[in-house]
Image (cartoon, rainbow, N blue to C red):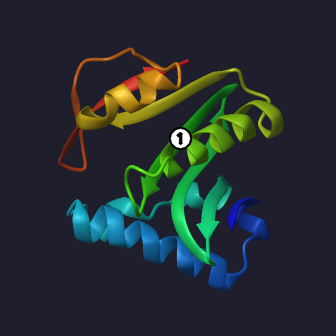
Amino acid sequence: MMRTIVKHFRELSNEEFFRICEVREQVFVLEQKITLCAELDEEDLRCHHITLTEGGRIVAYARCFADDGVAHIGRVLTTERGKGYGLEVMRAAMAVCREILGCSHLVVHAQQQVIGFYEKLGFRVTSDLFDECGILHRRMEI
């Protein structure tokens, strides 16, 4: 059974945050070769963390926070591609941005190869390519 969980950092148990870090390390550090110091940051402390679980394990994740009325969604991942988990967790993150954070202006830094994914959700490219942690990205906004 699939379950979406939304918690602010302050609400996460130690084990929940450990499991989030574990899946982020698996995808960003081991698969994409992003260094751990760049993957974990102070933003985690003020974020809402969205996990999509199935059978008790995290299958998708995103985090979001607001600055000056603009919501930022990041660290979007799925552990199994092609099953719709990415769309599900992004829809949940977008709802958090609008309903909990009160923002209608949403921003993501999209890796070049997944721009089409974010376009399906209504985001549009608003920047040239830039390097973030050794991976090419573009800023996208709604």
**Residue type pointed to by label 1:** Leu
Residue 10, position as x, y percentages in the image: 76, 67
Residue 72, position as x, y percentages in the image: 56, 36
Question: Vertical placement of 52 versus 116: above or below?
Answer: below
Q: Which of 89 and 110 is in front in this view?
A: 89
- Residue at x 34%, y 72% (from the top left corner): 26
Numbered disc 1: secondary structure: helix
Quarter of the image where one finds residue 66: top right
Q: Residues within 10 Å of mark 1 (few under 14, many from 20)?
A: some
Q: Nearer the viewer, residue 54 or 133?
A: 54
Quarter of the image where one finds residue 117: top left
Name the residue carrying label 1: 87
Can residue 22 be seen by looking at this rendering?
A: yes
Relative to 8, is 134 on the left or the right?
Answer: left
Q: In which quarter of the image is the C terminus?
A: top right
Residue 73, position as x, y percentages in the image: 54, 40
Can residue 37 be seen by looking at this rendering?
A: no
Q: Which of 106 and 35 is in front in this view?
A: 106
Q: In which quarter of the image is the N terminus?
A: bottom right
- Residue at x 52%, y 51% (from the top left corner): 85
User: Residue extending furthest bottom?
Assistant: 15
Question: Vertical placement of 55 versus 120: above or below?
Answer: below
Relative to 113, is 45 on the left or the right?
Answer: right
Relative to 121, is 34 on the left or the right?
Answer: left
- Residue at x 22%, y 25% (from the top left corner): 129
- Residue at x 44%, y 29% (from the top left corner): 118
